Image (cartoon, helix red, strand yellow):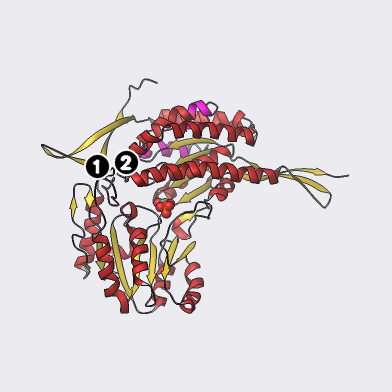
Amino acid sequence: KPWNGAVHDVFSPVYIETAEGLKQKLIGSYPLATEKEAAEALEAAVNAYHDGRGAWPVMSVSERIHCVEQFTGKMIAQKDIIVKLIMWEIGKSHADSVKEFDRTVEYIYATIDSLKNLDRDSSRFEIVEGIAAQVRRSPLGVVLCMGPYNYPLNETFTTLIPALIMGNTILFKPPKFGTLLHYPLQRAFQESFPKGVVNLLYGRGNVIIPGLMKSGKINVLTLIGSSKVANELKKLHPKVNQLRAVLGLDAKNAAIITSKADIPLTVKEVLTGSLSFNGQRCTALKIVWVHRSIAEEFIAQFSEAVSNLKFGLPWESGVSLTPLPEPDKVDYLNSCIQDAEVKGAKIRNENGGKSKASFFFPAVVYPVNKDMRLYHEEQFGPIVPIVPFDDAEEVIQYLIDTKYGQQVSIFTNDADELSELIDPLVNQVSRLNVNTQSQRGPDVFPFTGRKDSAEGTLSVTDAIRSFSIRSLVAFKMN
Ligand code: G3H
């Protein structure tokens, strides 16, 4: 519809050299919804759900799958523009932007396959103690869905698609950085689903989301982002005990490199684990514990590997380090480094911590200790804090004390050492990686976390469970 209200101009984090110096390019604008418009979108979602009696929640699973397939076809037709917008809006390299798109399409088809299998089970009747029961999966209601800027398409869709396909209706607010790329999908949503089933909300979260939560009409909150925001939003809901939350939150994943580690392999894994997409992944390695006896050797090889990473604009070939989308990020990263330096750590790699506009060259910081912010804070950016240890018990205690609980990666070539450490480590987190980096995928594996790192579980199949309830139609047999 024609828009007469306020708009937000989107400037790319990618700076371009011009005659007047470095300039940011205006790449588009989007309308800023008012509270009233957000409330209208909510009403549309509530009406489309119609207390579980709307066309969408009562539609057969195969018909809903058909709608999602139609949507996916339209999405694939717009791959080029969506990939370009991922690059321009969040500065992700071309290769990673294509990967994000393809992974999203694969996720949708995997969800469909998984649902077909589950649905096959639920069409059977089980007879127990004279009761014949059909176990179904029923929707939950209106889902408020918010994704993160680092995977604005992929991680948003890992919750949106399963929530949708299970018969819920959706209010969907794209991330602050990574909004424009959803615009080409707006028409595809409208053409593929009944009216009111998917409602896109453009705008500022702090303006439009509180009212939605306070209405009490949101049945599921799903957010990939910060635990602070998730907790604040949950508190606004008048019947919080009736709200289901599916949340992927903060993390400070640790690498533990023992004296028995294969150093070249460890360097390779920690490099991508900590610095792919500039370290802006919830699953990134954000603190590296290295046994004191091999610390210098590891740091020398690791720093050299960091220096060989290619810096550049998202469309340049072979780049792995690109501009950072958050405008205040460079200042934040500098403040973390200053804090560590004042307390005795040093940057150990050439050019580490140098910055220009939205570029920040990764810094390898050593020795980090518990008095420093880098020991506790989730930097979510290109800094690799390294902590020396003498006894693995120190690392276990760190994992016990921290408020995060997503992943840990252990590097050792000693089977006995590994078997002694597996249980104490994995019992602090939700995933232990052996001789490999931390990551979310493959997407069929459960993705969750302890403490402040998550609520609920995602994965192709777990997400289907997270956005539905098992219900019974039971008959008494005579
Ligand atoms: O930002 C958090 C994402 O879940 C990271 O996913 O490990 O596949 O890069 P990834």
The residue beneath circle 1 is 14
For label 2, the crowd category at 10 Å Cα-Cα, with few meaning under 14, some 14 to 19 and many 20 or more, is many
Front one among 242 and 99: 99
Badge 1 amino acid: Val
Going by the picture, which residue comes out furthest to the top? Answer: 2
Callout 1 touching callout 2 (CB < 8 Å):
yes
- Point out the stretch of residues depicted in magenta: 190-213
> Quarter-wise, where is residue 117 in the image?
top right
Q: Nearer the viewer, residue 90 or 415?
A: 415
Give me the residue at 60% from left, 40% from top.
139
Amino acid type, mark 2: Met
Residue 32 colored in magenta in the image: no
Q: Residue at x 74, y 44 (%)?
A: 124
Looking at the picture, how far across and down is residue 455, in whole percent? 50, 53
Which residue carries the number 2 mark?
A: 87
Does residue 238 appear in this view? no
Q: Residues within 10 Å of mark 1 (few under 14, many from 20)?
A: many
| Residue at far front of view | 317
Q: Is residue 89 visible?
A: yes
Secondary structure beneath dot 2 equals: helix
Q: Nearer the viewer, residue 86 or 52?
A: 86
